[in-house]
């Protein structure tokens, strides 16, 4: 059994990036130099503006909070295996944040002088760090030097595996769209639009003499420098820069950076004396790099069928897995994946609309509810949605509703095709109960508020997290205002809503043991959603509604807003914000690992550290439930 300190350090580090990319001998050598640091709760690791230490840090046990000096707002919390304090050492600058032990913590201090040579030698380590810093826009350390680790370009993040992808030939477009020097700019613009291309090759005697890009039209025509009736010769870039076919990814990137251009013209021998064989754009390079949010977003918007979108969604899941593997902060991950989810839904709606026999008879709004409405639907879970359409005369109501029910059915079918399961409770816009005009929705929500039985509270909990994904936002805003007006006139509703938030059982029993399912399909599994996530989500909802705050649906962001509104409870609310992200991240990891929703956890498959991370959130769950029980006098409701 291993018992030396350095061996135990190596055994821990090998489970976390970037150390998991090291060879065993390298890690053993580095571990000998590691210093173990113990920090009591609320003690400083380093202060803002302090000169960088000779070490950066990895959390072994406990947690470290990062914040601005003098601010109580926690910007990030580093958990077991997280790396922090590295950027200032590499950039040779002072610390931009204050690091303080969030609880009793053990840190491994890694000497930069021993680590840096390994990172320079090991491409996987360097790429991990570049990806982390370049992607972590929420991290103030990365703003000034984003993508410039060791002076390297951010384009270095193309490596998604051990293969040397930058030395592979890159695919390019052979479908050339060309014109002559005398072709009118208006004709060129129409042709580019028709063929959905970003550039036009100008030829003379079948040889390339110039190129016109979208940028040329924006800068030279849209600004009034040249009229739209001018010829291609006036705005084309010439002489043209050409390259031979067979370029590698690395050569393509360097060629574009060298000449500060976004398109490469490829000819038979690389000169303007031979015919053009293809054009390579920055987009082609991004596609070759791999899963990238900008590439995926563009692909989503170009998709013309749900089947095509389904393939793209596999890329989104790969992107999500990559972000989690690199320990990118979940707040940033959620925003990116939510944007891609919303874009996918919008494209499904547009595809469905294009297949309808008629245009919508009135304005409408598509509401995404539940986890998608909160911006927390990282996995392909089931769909919860609704339609609001404009009020119409009574005699037109059912005809209008029939149109939107048919549209809702087509959209729900499309969402199912791309990976979002049908709601088992049929809470979808294809159901008449979830497709109403604005006045009807006001009446429905007023009924829920004034008659808050168990069913009404459940429906409110799902519906009140809605977010506008498509259509007229004004309809949703008017409904939101109506909900707040009714709720404020009937404060007892908040008590019932709080009572509903307390229905979910505690996540732990005596001695902080996990409470597992006692029977059924998931016997002996831990229900992460019901016992840990939902209590925190439900509490955030009732608290934010009681403050009449709209347009903040995300659970973590709701708690951050509550921390501003109630400074006396700031510490608890920020702990809830952290716990909600930690639990969502854990569920997402489990879902990706087992290819399911991540809801039910097999405890015997978790290691000790994973169990510790989960249990750390349980105290927060109990504390927030105690707060809403007292705040909304739930016990009085039961008398």
Image: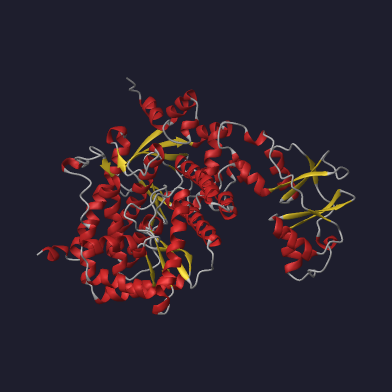
Give the quarter of the figure containing the C terminus: bottom left
443 shown above or below 555: below
Q: Is residue 29 left or right of residue 557?
A: right
Q: Is residue 572 left or right of residue 639?
A: right
Q: Quadrant of residue 548?
A: bottom left
Q: Residue at x 70, y 59 (%)?
A: 193
Can you give x and y, in whole percent of width and height, for residue 435 in the image? 38, 66
Q: Is 584 placed above or below 22 here?
A: below
- Residue 134 vertical position relative to residue 492 in the rendered view, above or below: above
Q: Position of residue 502 (x, y in %)?
A: 21, 57
Which residue is located at x 65 percent, y 49 percent?
283
Q: Position of residue 340 (x, y in %)?
A: 50, 53
Image point (23%, 55%), residue name: 623
Residue 333 showing in the rendered view: yes
Residue 508 vs residue 597, the one in the foreground: 597
The quadrant in which the N terminus is found is: top left
Q: How is the image coloured?
A: secondary structure
Residue 174 in percent (x, y) is at 74, 44
Q: Nearer the viewer, residue 429 or 100?
A: 429
Instruction: For residue 152, say whether it is visible.
Output: no
């Amino acid at each position: 059994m291993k018992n030396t300190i350095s061996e135990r350090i190596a055994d821990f580090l090998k489970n976390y990036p970037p150390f998991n990319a090291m060879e065993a001998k390298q890690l053993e050598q580095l571990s000998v130099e590691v210093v173990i640091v113990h920090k009591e709760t609320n003690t400083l690791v380093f202060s803002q503006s302090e000169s960088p230490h000779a070490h950066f840090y990895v959390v072994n046990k406990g947690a470290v909070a990062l914040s601005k000096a003098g601010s109580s707002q926690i910007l990030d919390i580093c958990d077991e295996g997280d790396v922090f304090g590295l950027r200032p050492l590499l950039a040779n600058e002072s610390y931009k944040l204050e690091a303080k032990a969030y609880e009793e913590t053990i840190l491994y201090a890694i000497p930069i002088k021993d680590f840096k040579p390994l990172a320079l030698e090991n491409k996987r380590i360097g790429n991990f760090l570049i990806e982390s810093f370049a992607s972590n826009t929420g991290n103030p350390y990365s703003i000034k030097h984003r993508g410039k680790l060791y002076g390297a370009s951010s384009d270095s993040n193309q490596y998604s595996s051990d293969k040397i992808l930058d030395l592979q030939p890159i695919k390019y477009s052979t479908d050339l769209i060309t014109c002559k020097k005398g072709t009118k700019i208006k004709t060129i613009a129409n042709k580019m639009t028709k063929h959905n291309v970003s550039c036009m090759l100008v030829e003379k005697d079948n040889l390339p003499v110039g190129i016109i890009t979208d940028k040329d039209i924006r800068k030279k025509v849209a600004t009034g420098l040249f009229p739209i009736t001018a010829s291609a010769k006036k705005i084309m870039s010439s002489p043209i820069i050409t390259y031979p076919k067979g370029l590698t990814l690395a050569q393509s990137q360097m060629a574009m950076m060298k000449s500060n251009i976004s398109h490469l013209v490829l000819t038979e021998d690389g000169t303007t004396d031979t015919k053009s064989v293809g054009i390579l754009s920055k987009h082609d390079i991004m596609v070759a790099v791999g899963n990238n949010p900008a590439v995926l977003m563009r692909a989503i918007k170009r998709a013309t069928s749900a089947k095509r979108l389904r393939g793209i969604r596999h890329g989104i899941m790969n992107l999500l897995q990559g972000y989690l593997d690199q320990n990118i902060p979940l707040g940033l991950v959620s925003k990116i994946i939510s944007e891609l989810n919303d874009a996918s839904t919008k494209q499904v709606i547009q595809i469905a609309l294009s297949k309808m026999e008629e245009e919508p008879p009135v304005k409408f709004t598509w509401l995404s509810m539940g986890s998608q409405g909160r911006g927390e639907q990282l996995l392909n879970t089931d769909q919860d949605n609704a339609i609001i359409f404009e009020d119409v005369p009574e005699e037109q109501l059912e005809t209008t509703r029939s149109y939107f029910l048919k549209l809702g059915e087509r959209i729900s079918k499309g969402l199912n095709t791309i990976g979002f399961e049908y709601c088992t409770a049929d809470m979808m816009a294809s159901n008449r109960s979830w497709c109403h005009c604005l006045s009807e929705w006001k009446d429905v929500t007023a009924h829920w508020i004034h008659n808050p039985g168990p069913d009404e509270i459940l429906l409110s909990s799902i519906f009140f997290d809605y977010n506008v994904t498509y259509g007229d936002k004004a309809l949703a805003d008017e409904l939101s205002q109506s909900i707040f007006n009714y709720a404020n006139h009937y404060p007892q509703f908040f008590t019932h809503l709080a009572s509903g938030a307390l229905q979910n059982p505690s996540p732990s029993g005596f001695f902080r043991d996990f409470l597992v399912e006692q029977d059924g399909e998931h016997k002996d599994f831990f229900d992460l959603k019901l016992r840990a996530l939902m209590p925190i989500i439900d509490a955030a909802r009732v608290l934010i509604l009681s403050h009449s705050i709209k347009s903040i649906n995300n659970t973590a962001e709701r708690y951050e807003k509550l921390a501003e509104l109630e400074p006396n409870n700031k510490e608890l609310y920020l702990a809830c914000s952290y716990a909600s992200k930690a639990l969502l991240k854990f569920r997402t990891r489990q879902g990706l690992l087992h290819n399911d929703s991540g809801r039910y956890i097999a405890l015997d498959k978790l290691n000790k550290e994973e169990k510790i991370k989960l249990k750390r959130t349980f105290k927060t769950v109990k504390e927030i439930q105690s707060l809403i029980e007292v705040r909304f006098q739930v016990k009085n409701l039961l008398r």
